[in-house]
Image (tube, helix red, strand yellow):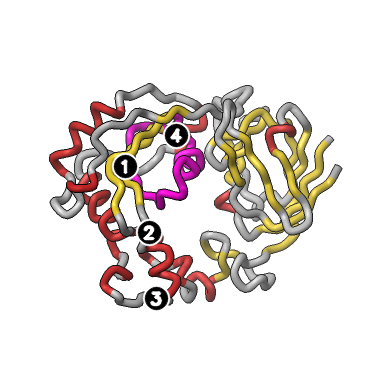
Amino acid sequence: MQYEGVLTKMQTENGAPIQYYLVFKTDFLHVNQLLDKNITITFLRYECLNCGLEKKIYRQGFCYDCFYEIPQAADWIMRPELSTAHLDKEDRDLEYEKKVQLQPHIVYLANSSNVKVGVTRKTQVPTRWIDQGAHEAIEIVEVPNRYLAGITEVALKEHVGDKTNWRTMLKNEVQDADLVTWREKLKPFIPEEAIPYFIENNTETHLEFPVLKYPVKLKSLNLDKTPTYNGVLKGIKGQYLIFEDDTVFNVRSNEGYVVAISVS
């Protein structure tokens, strides 16, 4: 059986375990059903997720020109403290920026390789945690816009990490942490503007990933260097496919790549 389409990040559904789906224009793949099956991934060409042209992907699934023009790739995406829609100030497209920035955002703690602080739109909970491969997470504040979430994250990352070690996460070399205690410990460092939005009473969310075998010596699959790869799928965690030979494939970092996937 063969499927073909442009890669975008896997869609997920929280469950025990989490369910993963690859959605193409004309194909739909329930990735959990491929566990223990032989998979071949073949790189065919590029397709920018914005303009749809066959142009080399630069970052985040976009070609060079689109990456530097469209609001979906502006600096405030990665650095929410740069958000300005609450000031009615445009960066690239004020209408888009108001739509995304002026909605409830969550500042959270997640534990994937270590405890880290992060920001996401409220509608993306728990999807954001799943995408990061976090086995546990907790919300700290719920604020009305992206800017407030951003300045809170900046303040808290002086006292806790803000990056995930993807190798540790994929090897499952992780330890449980008491995130409620972490939340209380960080409360004094929340900016004054965000303190009214502190969440006093909530519990950790625990996430279960469909992994049959964790890798030991990671080998990252690069489709530009290895356009065809074959292996037995042994797990899915974060946005990674994990194969029996310890090869791992980051679906999200290959957005905009058109591939053929065959299953046997």
* Three-letter code, disc 2: Gln
Q: CA distance from mark 2 to mark 1?
A: 19 Å
Q: CA distance from mark 4 to mark 3?
A: 33 Å
Which quadrant would residue 15 be assigned to in this image?
Answer: top right
* Three-letter code, disc 3: Leu
N-terminal label among 1 and 4? 1
Q: Is 164 in the magenta?
A: no
Q: Which residue matches tag 4? A: 134
Q: Is residue 194 left or right of residue 176?
A: left
Q: Which residue matches tag 2? A: 103
- Of labels 2 and 1, the one closer to you: 2
Please state which of residues 53 and 201 is positioned toward the viewer in this rendering: 201
Q: Which residue matches tag 1? A: 117
Q: Which residue matches tag 3? A: 94
Q: Is residue 90 left or right of residue 14?
A: left
* Three-letter code, disc 4: Ala
Identify the image quadrant of the N terminus: top right
